[in-house]
Image (cartoon, rainbow, N blue to C red):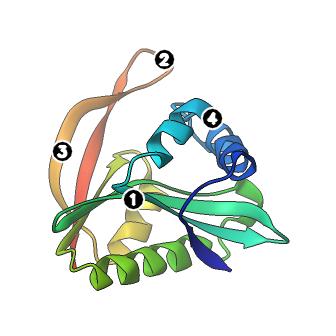
Amino acid sequence: MITKILNCSDSEIEQIAQIESQLFTDSWDFQALQDLFSQDCNYVFVVQQDKTIVGYCICQMMFDTAEILRIAVDKNHQRQGFAWQLLSKVTDFLNQHRVEKLLLEVREDNVLAINFYQKFWFNQIHIRKGYYANQDGTTTNALILQKDL
């Protein structure tokens, strides 16, 4: 079941932070997530199984534009349609709030994510050269993608 959380509990934040640390080298910790969720312009949608968060989407809405800050599904629940369901729920919510465009950034080398976003009708509008720092000292470009709502 996918729900929008208005006020994240400490337990929910801990579950999201755990998925963050599992999936991202630049993961957000408990405090960073707590600070993020305290801002009125940020929304979190979660997918749960047996009351455990297995995926989430964090978006920020400003006037007629929104940005996906994070979308993630834990490794044990990937490739089951949860990311698609989350993104569908988020776009429905944004449409209800008359948001006109949705942005996100993705690592240029994250081919699976890029393919997923293209299937969801996102188009590349910009490149941020050398945006992501890699562990080996190199950098990777960020692609800025946009979907018109």
Image side of residue 101 versus residue 119, left or right: left
Between 8 and 74, the one lying in front of the other is: 8
Of labels 4 and 2, earlier in sequence is 4
Spatial separation of the CA atoms under disc 3 and disc 4: 30 Å
Q: Amino acid at mark 3?
A: Ile
Mark 1 or 2, closer to the camera: 1
The type of residue carrying mark 2 is Asp
* Residue 75 image position (x, y, % from top left): 71, 55
Helix, strand or loop at label 4? It is helix
Q: Is residue 96 left or right of residue 26?
A: left
Q: Residues within 10 Å of mark 3 (few under 14, many from 20)?
A: some
Q: Please name the amino acid that badge 4 sits on.
A: Phe
Label 1: how many residues lie within 10 Å, few (<14), some (14-19) or many (20+)? Answer: many
SS at mark 1 in the image: strand
Mark 1 sits on what residue?
59
Mark 3 touches mark 1? (CB < 8 Å): no
Which residue is at 70% across, 45% downward? 10
Q: Quadrant of residue 127?
A: top left
Residue type pointed to by label 1: Cys
Q: Identify the residue position indicated by label 2 in the image.
A: 136
Disc with the residue nearer the chain's start (1 vs 4): 4
In front: label 3 or label 4 = 4
Q: Where does label 3 land, which residue?
A: 127
Alpha-carbon span between mark 3 and mark 1: 20 Å
Residue 30 got which mark? 4
Q: Which secondary structure, mark 2?
A: loop
